[in-house]
């Protein structure tokens, strides 16, 4: 019997219309969808897909990705998730793993994918619109200036002040807790600062007051150098 | 009379299936498409769109973006292009400007957009899949490692060796002419190097020999730090 195929699908950052034609086709043709498990089984990527595609007859596999730092625990969880998927693939059934935004940018998919690849199954990845591109579109700004670099930085990690010294545009992702530190660090600098929370979702909000606002987990901050 | 609306549309990096549902809807509903002029009026973005959408009845406006560095000449060209679009918008007709990949990442659209915005027309931007995400999908790699940053660098600009010192993953865009310099600079470094030319197009090619191969303009090189 032929083995099933394992797909990694980026569903875009929130707006179901930002799904690609390819993502829609693959999800429509795949009976089993896999997503990370959440407390209430309300997965954001699944929610986005379900607004564009009828998923009522799909089998949904919720995979457990424990929120811990212990590498051994994480590795075991990834192996267990991969083995759950392999069990379905062995029956000749395809599985599509849905991920928010793009698959290659800060997604948990890559861990599972590399295990499934090593096990010898056929895999295919479908790129998606990453959140920072959707944020730029909504803010009506370009992320780049001429031929300068673009830096995508998870705000939860590292020294914001040091990142701000990089040449070109800086995009801070999941920056909810770092907005005040970023705002302080760019004081007196020749930069423009833009921000948006929950881009593409119902709770989407453009940040207008960087000092007094409160910010959620899915907050993106863009710091652009002023053009001469 | 109501003025027309000006759309900026990212059509993705090559594969017409990587168009978003939103891009398809807007292009289908817009009679006038604008693209940068090329020698033979063969625009890549238009070619991508035409493989997913019937554009045979659309009016195509070819805009001249001179390949010069003189800022004054460029500014004049942008003003002239914006005025051509404004003329159509004034008739109450919508115009969609098509751009390769995503609109906010190294696209000429931003110059025209900011002029049209200042002129007071209503504009909307539709994000697309940027080429580096599609390249990562094809290479089946993640662009990020844990919470490390991701740097998008136009290879034609700056010092490749210096860029390689940045923490995290480095993506060199339009790297055709820089592949050998990058390969030399990463010698003896603990990195993995990946490359692809013309991603999503018929001439797509994964780079397997970084030393002896020849590389085209649309070449992307990804340098990842080896994981411990």
Image: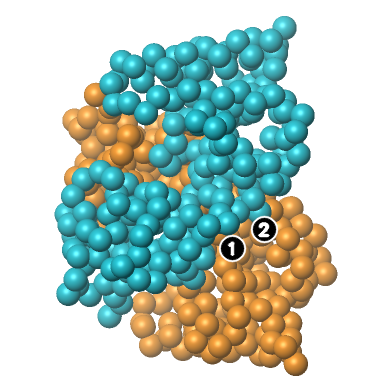
Chain colours: A cyan, B orange
Of the numbered discs 2 and 1, the one sitting upstream in the chain is: 2
- Spatial separation of the CA atoms under disc 2 and disc 1: 7 Å
* Disc 2 target residue: B22
Q: Is residue A171 above or below residue B60?
A: above
The chain containing the residue under callout 2 comes to B
Residue under the point 39% across and 71% down? A208
Relative to A17, A214 lies left or right: left
The residue at the point 69 percent across, 46 percent down is A51
Q: Position of residue B67 (x, y in %)?
A: 45, 74
Q: Quadrant of the C terminus of chain B?
A: top left
Is residue B102 at all visible to an observer of this figure?
A: no
Residue appearing at x 18%, y 50% in the figure: A159
When the figure is inspected, residue A91 is found, relative to residue B158, above or below; the finding is above
Residue B126 is marked as: 1
Asked if labels 1 and 2 touch by Cβ distance under 8 angstroms, the answer is yes
The picture places residue B142, in percent across and down from the top left corner, at 42, 35
Outermost residue toward the bottom in this view: B1
**Which residue is more in the foreground, A131 or B56?**
A131
- The answer to which image quadrant residue A207 occupies is bottom left
Q: Is residue B135 visible?
A: yes
**Closest to the observer, B35 or B119:** B119
Residue B97 is drawn in which quadrant? bottom right
């Amino acid at each position: 019997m032929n083995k099933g195929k394992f797909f990694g699908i980026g569903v875009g950052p929130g707006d179901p219309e930002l799904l690609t034609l390819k993502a829609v086709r693959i999800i429509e043709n795949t009976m089993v969808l896999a997503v990370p498990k959440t407390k209430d089984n309300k997965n954001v990527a699944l929610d986005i897909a379900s607004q564009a595609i009828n998923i009522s007859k799909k089998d949904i596999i919720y995979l457990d990705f424990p929120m811990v730092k212990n590498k051994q625990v994480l590795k075991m969880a990834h192996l267990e998730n991969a083995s759950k998927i392999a069990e379905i693939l062995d029956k000749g059934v395809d599985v599509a793993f849905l991920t928010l935004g793009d698959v290659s940018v800060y997604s948990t998919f890559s861990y599972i994918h590399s295990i499934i690849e090593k096990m010898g199954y056929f895999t295919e990845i479908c790129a998606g619109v990453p959140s920072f591109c959707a944020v730029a579109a909504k803010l009506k700004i370009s992320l780049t200036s001429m031929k300068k670099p673009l830096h995508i930085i998870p705000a939860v990690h590292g020294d914001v002040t040091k990142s701000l010294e990089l040449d070109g545009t800086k995009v801070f992702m999941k920056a909810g807790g770092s907005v005040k530190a970023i705002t302080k660090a760019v004081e007196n600098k020749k930069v423009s600062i833009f921000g948006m929370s929950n881009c593409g979702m119902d709770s989407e909000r453009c940040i207008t007051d960087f000092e007094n606002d409160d910010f959620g987990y899915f907050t993106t901050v863009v710091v652009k150098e002023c053009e001469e």
